[in-house]
Structures are given as structure tokens and as C-alpha cells.
Image (cartoon, rainbow, N blue to C red):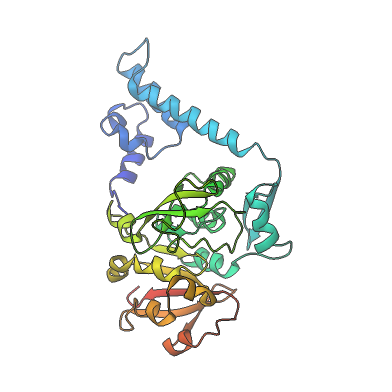
Amino acid sequence: MTHHPNLNDHRRAVLRSPGDSGAYLERIYDVFSLFDPDDLARLTRRADVLRGLQRGKSLESHTADHMVLGRSQRRFVASRSNAVRDVDVDGHRLRFLAGRGPENRFFVTAMPEGKIHEIGVIRLLAARMKPEELFLDIGAHIGYISCFAAHFGATVLAMEMQPTLLPVISANAILNGLWRIHPILAAAGETVGLVQSMRVVASPGLMTFSERLDGDVVPTSSLNHDIVPRLRIDDFCFDRGDIPAWVKVDVEGAEGPVLAGAKDLIAQRRTRFLVELHSHRYKSFGTTAQGMLDLFAPEHWRVGMIRDDGSVEPMTRAQFLAHDSTADDRQTIFEPVDL
């Protein structure tokens, strides 16, 4: 993640001297990233008074007021459904929409009552995630793991290619007051372009064939497909100089193309990859376990399986390749040996 080492110092300076307009007017747009909208509105109004603007408002005050209204509107969108479900993992309790929309199938399919979905991943993040790390969630679905990652202090880029799920991700983030989750409508792959996704139920486990539905396979005029951008993780990360500390990949068999689009990031050896493996679907995407493993050089990377208690069970490369393709989907972690 791009770090601004002086931002927190600047925030402390503003809090120490709330009457000193210079403390925040000098770097007002940095301040816009550091404070909640209500605090920003108070700070900018105080600055207007100190600058002698007794009538009217400055541009900064107008901007802060629009931020207050914007957050209020987002909360209103999230509150339109009264049906929610609390999920508690070791005292970390979050709330998720549980109405009749696409979120319903998540709980019916992946998380029936009494079950905690991906509990090992959540416990691993709780134990090892550091505040302000960047978490890239590929295949975010309703934002379930995204919300837990943000709860543990991360800034989250939640990438999902099913348009009906983007409002659910946003609503779940807002329900939990997690303002550093950023939903992004896109698929991830080895190449950049546009792909088509059939407008079927937004169900967990849906194989969307983002790499296969390319070119002219389906007419652009189709009434039953969405057209979404496909990005490479490398372009996604390096464009802003942001290096994610974590990348989670849950794409129902398309793990190979997604990871192939992260070769430069893998070469940096600064990121942990949490990959749910769906080996019984590799053939659909032209992927092999060996090809995926070859992306992570053995001298630089170790491989492990995530247990339900959040610990990591080391795996040899032979064990990785020998995994039974009919077994349950497997939560795997690729870690740089130097981290």
C-alpha cells in the first residue's frame, strides 16, 4: 500500500490544535482522508471563522458538508433491509444483510445456521493482519471476508464481477461502519479486456467462465449477459504503487489465470496469497496444478493449508500436486519465505 508517513502526525497536530486553522488548511485534502465527515465539517467551519469568512462558506466547507450528506445517503441505502444476520468469530461480531436478495443464497448455500464460513481464514487474518495493510479480495461475493479484513484494520479492494453483488458489498460495509472497503466491478485474469458474465443467480460456487467467455463467443447484444472489465492483478496494484499485503482469490476454478496475471506482484515477494483451490474445475480454464505451482518458486515461497483454528499446516509440493480433485475446496496460503 502507498504510505504517507506524515499523515498520522498531521492528524495528531490537527487534534492537538483545533483552533489553529493552519494545521489543516495547509494540507486540506490530506485532512479529507483522515477524519470522519462530521469531524471534517466542524474543522472546516472553524477554519472559515478563523479566516474571517463570516458569511457564506469556503470550498472546503462545502466539500465537507457534501461528505456528511454522502455518508448519510449510504447509510440509508444499507438500512432499507431489516433482515440481518450476526456472525461472531471469537468475539469479533459483524452484521450482514440476510434478506431475500443475492445475500440469501450465500447464507443458504455457504453458511447455514450453526456453520461459520471460512473460519480458518478469518482466524488467520485476526492473528496476523496488521493495521492499514492493503487487502485485495478477488471474488468478494457479498463482501464477507472483505468485512472481516477491514474489521481487523485493513483497507480492502473488493473485486467482484457480478453486478448484483456490488450493492450488497457496499451495504455490508456500511452496516459495520467499515469505510475503507471499496467495491470494484471487475473480473481478474491473465489479460486485460472485457468479458461477459451470464445473468444467472449470484450464488456462491458459480463458475462464471471469465476467461472462456471472451471475444465473440456471445453476441454483445445479448439480453442475458453483463459485460464487465477484466483486469490483471499486476496492473491493479502497480498503477498506484500499492503493494497489497494480502490477496485472497476465490474464483471457482479460475485461480490459474488470476494468479498468472499477478506474476510481477509474485516476483516482489511481499504479499501473501490466500487461494481457495477448486482443482476439479481447472480443466475448464486450461489450468493445471503444476502450472499454478510453478508461479511460486520453491526457493522463495512456502505452501500451506489453512486449518480451522487459523494455523497453517505446511505442505510439500508433492502434497500440493497430489491433492484429490474430488476433495472439498481447499484453503491454501502461499507465503514468501522472507516474511
**Image quadrant containing the C terminus:** bottom left
In the displayed structure image, the side of residue 330 where residue 214 appears, left or right = left
Depth check, front residue: 20 or 248? 248
Say above or below: 128 vs 159: below
In the image: residue 41, left or right of residue 76: left
Q: Please provide percent x and percent y for residue 158.
A: 46, 53
Side of 298 where 91 appears, left or right = right
Place of residue 327 in the rendered image (x, y in percent of width and height, measured from the top left)? 60, 80
Residue at 52% x, 73% y: name it. Answer: 281
Q: Residue at x 27, y 28 (%)?
A: 22
177 lies above or below 338: above
Between 306 and 90, the one lying in front of the other is 306
Question: Does any portion of residue 155 appear in the rendered image?
Answer: no
State the image quarter where residue 287 is shown: bottom left
Which quadrant is home to the N terminus?
bottom left
Residue depicted at 44% across the width and 30% down the height: 67
Q: Position of residue 17 (x, y in %)?
A: 35, 32
Foreground residue, 284 or 3?
A: 284
Residue extending farthest right: 113
| Residue 292: percent from left, percent from top | 39, 76
Marks counted in the figure total: 0
Front residue of 96/291: it is 291
**Can you see residue 262?**
yes
